[in-house]
Amino acid sequence: MPKVDYSQIEEMDFSPIDEAVYDAVLTDWELKEGDKGPYYNTEFTLDESAEEYKNRKVWTIMSLAPKALWRFKRDMTRLGADPEDMAPESDVDTDQIIARNVGASCRLKIVQEAYEANDGETKVRNNIKEVMAAELPF
């Protein structure tokens, strides 16, 4: 049985953050397959301007389903992707588009929403309502 060093564990806080617009950076993504098609589970990290929430991670899903593709295009463009890469005649795939934008700064409109947990209890979680270009004012 392996022994582990628990002294290096960082405390993780998953409590909802306040509703606001935060400066953030796209830090990671993973392509997954869903019932309605592929999607990206995207991770953003709030920057130092978020003060008490600095370095907190927030996630959103960017669907590649035909009816939701407009949002992927909008969000990637706001992160700095070249719209020509998403033109119908482009041969650039979506993995390339999102990978090129890891590290891109943006603003996130984050809200709180209630949901029913597996145990039947109503809880509150964050939802990224909108990804905005970094230079947009509040």
Image (cartoon, helix red, strand yellow):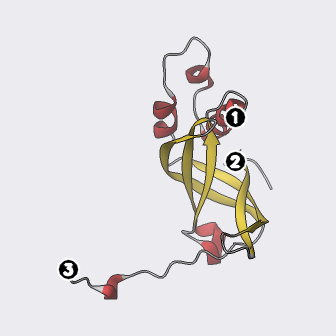
SS for tag 3? loop
Q: Residues within 10 Å of mark 3 (few under 14, many from 20)?
A: few
Q: Which of the two labelled residues, at mark 2 and mark 3, occupies the earlier sequence position?
A: 3
Amino acid residing under circle 3? Pro
Look at label 1 and name its amino acid.
Arg
Left or right position of 68 against 45: right
Res. 123 image quadrant: bottom right
The C terminus lies in which quarter of the figure?
bottom right
- Residue tagged by mark 2? 131
Crowd band around label 2 with a 10 angstrom C-alpha radius: few (<14), some (14–19), many (20+): many
According to the picture, the residue beneath numbered tag 3 turns out to be 2
Q: Is residue 78 above or below residue 129?
A: above
Q: Nearer the viewer, residue 105 or 4?
A: 4
138 over 132 or under it: above or below = below
In the shown orientation, is residue 25 left or right of residue 75? left
Q: Which mark is residue 44?
A: none
